[in-house]
Amino acid sequence: MFDKISTFESSLSFVSIFSGLMALLSAFVSFIAINYGINISFENFSIIFSNITFLQAILFVLTFFIGFIIHGIRYLGFDYYRRIRNSKNYKKNLCTRFLFYMFRNGTVIEECLNEKRNLKENTKLTSYKWIDESNNVVLDVWNHAKEIFVKYPQLDIYKFYYYSECFQCFDTIFIFVSILTFLFGTTDCIIKHDILTSHFIMIVGLSFSFFIFHIFSKKTGKSFARRFFLEIQLGLNLLNNNSEK
């Protein structure tokens, strides 16, 4: 049983399912805040569920589906930015900066390049010898991981990579929910003439909270990416030690 859980933990299914659940949970919290405000008790949750319309239920299902495929959406954005970045007409502007922040910043590839840039700029060795010695860190991160996985599958080398991917998806979900909660919540308050009331303040506070979760998720994704680099370093140390025997 534990072996199955460990295998699931190191897979795209883990990333997809938890992304879908997080998207659904975030949408539900936003829905309650916009429709019922802050004065909602746990006893009234049954009323909330009974009042959900068919259209709202469809939207919740759609939210889960979007969350489930958010990893693919992130990859599309990542690949689109890569194509723009490698084109001859590339220029830094608001659009490219937005694409970088949304889909490139915090990824394993970008963290690899950051470590390499820091080495060149500061002339100090990083915490990872394999990055210091690499001539093509973008390829080596996957080549080293694959070699370790083949020879020592028990190390579960990709676990922290998938953790990083999961929090990168949370990062995207939270910033989308933050923006949508503010837009829909403010629109609802304007229609109901509820601007500058406790309900509106709660909507703004919730949007800000989602944005803070977005920032924490991005930082956590970066941390797990660097932990993935450490696992690669430890695996390479094991490979080198065994080859010397």
Image (spheres, rainbow, N blue to C red):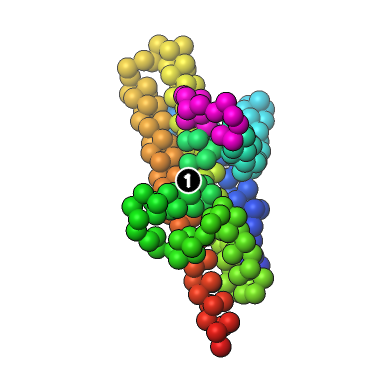
Q: Secondary structure at mark 1?
A: loop
Residue hosting label 1: 106
Vertical placement of residue 142 versus 84, above or below: below
Residue sitting at x 53%, y 71%: 236
Residue 191 position, x and y percent, is: 46, 11
Vertical placement of residue 89 versus 195, above or below: below
Q: Seen in the image, is 219 located left or right of residue 90?
A: left
- Front-lying residue, 132 or 174: 132
In what quadrant of the picture does the C terminus appear?
bottom right
Residue sitting at x 47%, y 45%: 106
Residue 229 position, x and y percent, is: 49, 61
Q: Is residue 150 visible?
A: yes
Q: Is residue 93 magenta?
A: yes
Query: Tag 1: Cα neighbours inside 10 Å, few (<14), some, or many (≥20)?
Result: many
- Which region of the structure is painted magenta? 85-99
| Label tally | 1
In what quadrant of the picture does the N terminus appear?
bottom right
Residue sitting at x 48%, y 49%: 113
Residue sitting at x 57%, y 72%: 155
Residue 67 position, x and y percent, is: 60, 40
